[in-house]
Amino acid sequence: MDILDYYDLKEWWNTALTPAQRDQISRDYQPMGYPSGERYLYAKQGKSYCETDKCCFLDVLACVAKDDAKDIIWNKTEQAVKEALSQPRKNYKDIHLALVGLIKYHYRLRENPAHYDKAKELCLLQISIANQAAKAFSKPPKPHGISLKKLEEILGHKPVGYDIPPIMPSHIGFKQLAIILEKEGDLKGALKLSQKALKQGWNDNYEKRITKLTAKLAKCK
């Protein structure tokens, strides 16, 4: 099976997008290390290559797509995010990353009230899973396809790097919604969001933002 079959996207792919759009995306979607000129989306591969959730895969396709195809794929990405959130077992890292793309997409089109409201809605959705995502991102990486204990037995010593917690990424939901609330005049709401993001460990210079918002609130008093 190819990657579109694996994610159960083949029918959608063939009906939602035009032949020209499919050609552009399949031509330009070239994962690192894959032979140049070959269409990765149609290549038959084993399940081991599918290490991300459907929503994260669609997020990448949306970034590659051009013009109207972007809108189509971002809409499908949002649908996939909501499907992922309804599952008993959730990949919070991939859901978080897919929401990053969705929020940026809608906020770029914020002159349209529908996109502005959608950006705020998606910020709130990403914030609602922020605690779970933070726990997922803070865990040290695991070697693919093998346990740490087994790897240690093979190497004869503890593997280097797997006991070091990774650096937390930024959180576009907290950051963007704080900016929106500040522009709308809700300084207390923006401050509360920034304090929560800092407490959870997200990496985005929240100390500076908190200092600025605190100073603004003091002037208002």
Image: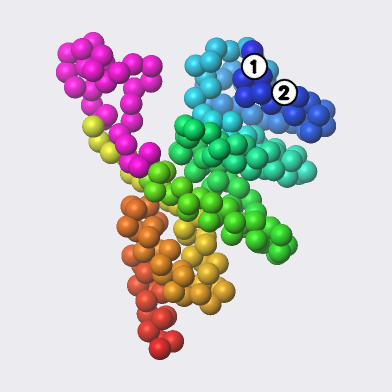
Which residue is the extreme one toward the bottom?
Answer: 221
Tag 1 secondary structure: loop
Q: Is residue 95 visible?
A: yes
Question: Residue 143: percent from the left, percent from the top?
Answer: 34, 22
Please say if 43 is above or below 169: above
Q: Quadrant of the C terminus?
A: bottom left
Judge the density around disc 1: few (<14), some (14-19), many (≥20) Cα neighbours within 10 Å.
some
Q: Which residues are magenta?
A: 135-162
Q: What's the CA distance linking mark 2 and mark 1?
A: 9 Å
Disc with the residue nearer the chain's start (2 vs 1): 1
Tag 2 secondary structure: helix
Do labels 2 and 1 touch, CB within 8 Å? yes
Horizontal side of 24 relative to 201 (left or right) equals right
Which residue is the extreme one toward the left?
Answer: 157
Going by the numbered disc 1, the residue's amino acid type is Asp
Horizontal side of 202 relative to 119 (left or right) equals left
What mark, if any, has residue 10 been given in the picture? 2
Residue lying at 50% horizontally and 55% vertically, measured from the top left: 173
Q: Which residue is mark 1?
A: 2
Camera-side residue: 66 or 210?
210
Please say if 155 is above or below 191: above
Q: Quadrant of the N terminus?
A: top right
Q: Is residue 20 visible?
A: no
Question: Residue 58: percent from the left, percent from the top?
Answer: 62, 34
Going by the numbered disc 2, the residue's amino acid type is Lys
Residue 152 on the magenta segment: yes
Question: Residue 84: percent from the left, percent from the top?
Answer: 56, 36
Please say if 47 is above or below 131: above
Residue lying at 76% horizontally and 24% vertically, measured from the top left: 11
Judge the density around disc 2: few (<14), some (14-19), many (≥20) Cα neighbours within 10 Å.
few
Of marks 2 and 1, the one in the foreground: 2
